[in-house]
Amino acid sequence: MRQVTGWLTCHPRSLDDEEEAQRAQILERCPELAALAGRVRTFAAVMTERQGHLLDKWIAATQASGLGPLAGFAHGLTGDYDAVRNGPSLPTPRCPVTGCAAPWPRNWSTS
């Protein structure tokens, strides 16, 4: 089970040919798992490719998917929707000296 979870949640290019073939076989046998894999991959793309404008569509499709726990996760995202959407939508702050992504200030407080 752990291996299959890894195949579903890792970046697609990190799988070798044998792992990709095994993943494809498992998804072919289980349509629900294939649907889950598609929703997970789409969510990962929205987040990593900073496509926050697609989040509404992803949430709606996932809630309607019938994939219970994942639909619950999608619903949970609406609880702090502005923060969730802004994460992949707003530009990453950059350090003015190095141009690297700036770390949180040392005095950052969540309270």
Image: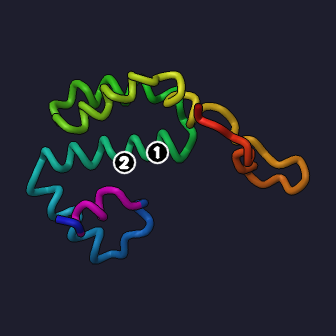
Most extreme residue toward the front is 111
- Please report the bounds of the magenta region as a residue range: 3-10
Asked if residue 109 is positioned above or below residue 28 in the image, the reply reads above
Above/below status of 75 relative to 14: above
Q: Is residue 24 left or right of residue 109?
A: left
- The reply to whether the magenta stretch includes residue 41 is no
**What residue sits 79% from the left and 46% below the top?**
94
Alpha carbons under labels 2 and 1: distance apart: 6 Å
- Asked if residue 85 lies left or right of residue 27, the reply is right
Residue 90: image location, x then y, percent: 65, 32
| Position in image of residue 49 (x %, y %) | 55, 44
Assign the C terminus to one quadrant of the image: top right
State whether residue 15 is above or below residue 8. Answer: below
Disc 2 target residue: 41
**Considering depth in this image, is 28 or 89 the residue closer to the camera?**
89
On-image quarter of the N terminus: bottom left
Query: Which one is in front, 94 or 48?
Result: 94
The residue carrying pointer 2 sits among few (fewer than 14), some (14 to 19) or many (20 or more) residues within 10 Å by Cα, namely some
Q: Quadrant of residue 92?
A: top right
- The kind of residue tagged 1 is Ala
Measured as percent of width and height from the top left, residue 28 is found at 14, 56
Left or right: residue 39 versus residue 92 is left
The image quarter in which residue 43 lies: top left
State the residue position of label 1.
Answer: 45
Please give the count of numbered marks on the rendered protein: 2
Judge the density around disc 1: few (<14), some (14-19), many (≥20) Cα neighbours within 10 Å.
some
- Residue 10 vs 53, above or below: the answer is below
Left or right of 58, for residue 81:
right
The reply to whether dot 2 and dot 1 touch (C-beta < 8 Å) is yes
Q: Residue at x 22, y 64 (%)?
A: 4
Q: Which mark is residue 16?
A: none
